[in-house]
Amino acid sequence: MPSDKAAIAPQTRPFEVNNSLVLGIAVPMTLAFLTTPLLGLVDTAVVGRLGDAVLLGGLAIAAIIFDLIFASFNFLRSATTGLVAQAMGRDDPTEEQAVFWRSLMIAVVAGIVVIAATPLLLATGLRFMGAEGELAAAAGTYLSIRALSAPVALANYTVLGYILGRGMGKTGLLVQTIINGTNIALSVWFALGLGYGLEGVAWATVAAEVVGCAAGLIIIRWRFDPAFKPSWPQIIDQASIRKLMALNGDIMIRSFALIAGFAWFTRLGTGFGETTLAANAILMNFFMVAGYYLDGFATAAEQIAGRALGARHRPALIKAVKLTSLWGFALAAFTTTFFLVFGTEVVALMTTLEAVRAEAGMYLFWAALTALSGALAFQMDGVFIGATWSRDMRNMMLISLALFIALSIVLSDHWGNLGLWIAFNIFLAARGFTLLALLPRRIDRTFRPVQAGIGKEA
């Protein structure tokens, strides 16, 4: 009879990881995620065409505050992706559906809370960003309208999380295209065609979130297999909800810290004047384009890493890390090169203000470099989200944020806005390398044979 402490190998469900699998998830989702920064570019260009730097600065501040609030709930997407992928790896379709319904309930409740707290959030956010007068009025107008989309916007996080957890790249592309395509079309129509200006851009976003949520729920509900429909007690299982909430808490702190870094960047930029603030807002879209471009391969890392842990198949996880990192750095290099070559033309398309164009040109190199600086961070985030190693991701983010704040203060004192951009690049790189340093140990601990009689890993 074996000893209680004898090591046993957990049941594994091997599957092959290759370029075809990675690209099958990454390419559609790269295209899908690119529609989001494209939306940001269009919104910025639409407001920039109004010929008022105050409105452009107000949009930049509002976007940061909005992201600070909503992206703090990005755990709804991330946690859903990881848990659904792991359930898929275990071949447990009932739990896949149960994870979705649990996350959706949290999303709707959180959205209602956000609407109720909008006045407080708005006042606090504007004060933190140092916005006053016309700048604060413009940002407040946009935020007050856009906040109305909170329940459906957060529900869309859950919808996308389930889709990504299942590795359904083409479906993810469809849903994101519906949301952002609708938003782009309505932004141009409402703001320029109908003359509603900044308010039109905000209402376009609200309408697009509603349309996208309806489409996503219909698609997912249609794809659910009734044979594996979870019961209500399974959906509200206390142990499962506690696990989800614990995971959500870590990812929420990580997401809040990430957006806080962007907010800090904008806050310091505000002190350099409206022209520099507007230039930074335009250049930050370069990073957003790179970010969503890289997020396609980070998504592939999420799904495959989660599936590998659920299937207890270590080789799949290691292969996923290698392939997604290779593709990620290749695309980051391409993105950086593109903006170095064509960045001046892109800036010119986004604003008619010569002073803003000239200011943006001074920092274009550092904005283009953010793609390479952040490439590893995106891939490591994908792996750690899929594996649900949320505590490590949270801790390394907080360390990187503290480093960024300290460096930004010191470097901006010496070199102004240039120092701020240098510190931002260091922040992006630090996120990736701190997680990479932890990865080997985490893999070894996770795939260590379970001790018989204990029932879980050491």
Image (cartoon, helix red, strand yellow):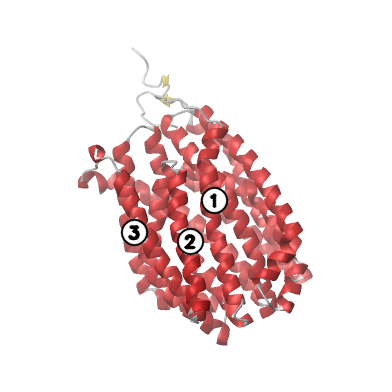
- Answer yes or no: is residue 121 visible: no
What residue is drawn where x is 32% and y is 62%?
109
Locate the N terminus and report the quarter of the image it occupies: top left
Which residue matches tag 1? 31
| Disc 2: CA contacts within 10 A as few (<14), some (14-19) or many (>=20) | many
Camera-side residue: 400 or 3?
400
The amino acid pointed to by label 1 is Leu
Disc sitting over residue 180 in the figure: 2
Disc sitting over residue 214 in the figure: 3
Element type at mark 2: helix
- Real-space CA distance between mark 1 and mark 3, rounded to the nearest whole angstrom: 21 Å
Camera-side residue: 145 or 316?
145
Element type at mark 1: helix
Q: Position of residue 88 (x, y in %)?
A: 38, 36
Camera-side residue: 172 or 80?
172
The amino acid pointed to by label 2 is Asn
What residue is drawn where x is 45% and y is 49%?
172
Q: Position of residue 243 (x, y in %)?
A: 36, 46
Earlier in the chain: of badge 1 and badge 2, it is: 1
Task: Classify residue 10 as left or right of residue 109.
Answer: right
Quarter-of-image position of residue 261: bottom right
Quarter-of-image position of residue 19: top right
Q: Residue furthest bottom?
A: 133
- Real-space CA distance between mark 3 and mark 2, rounded to the nearest whole angstrom: 14 Å
Task: Classify residue 338 as left or right of residue 314.
Answer: right
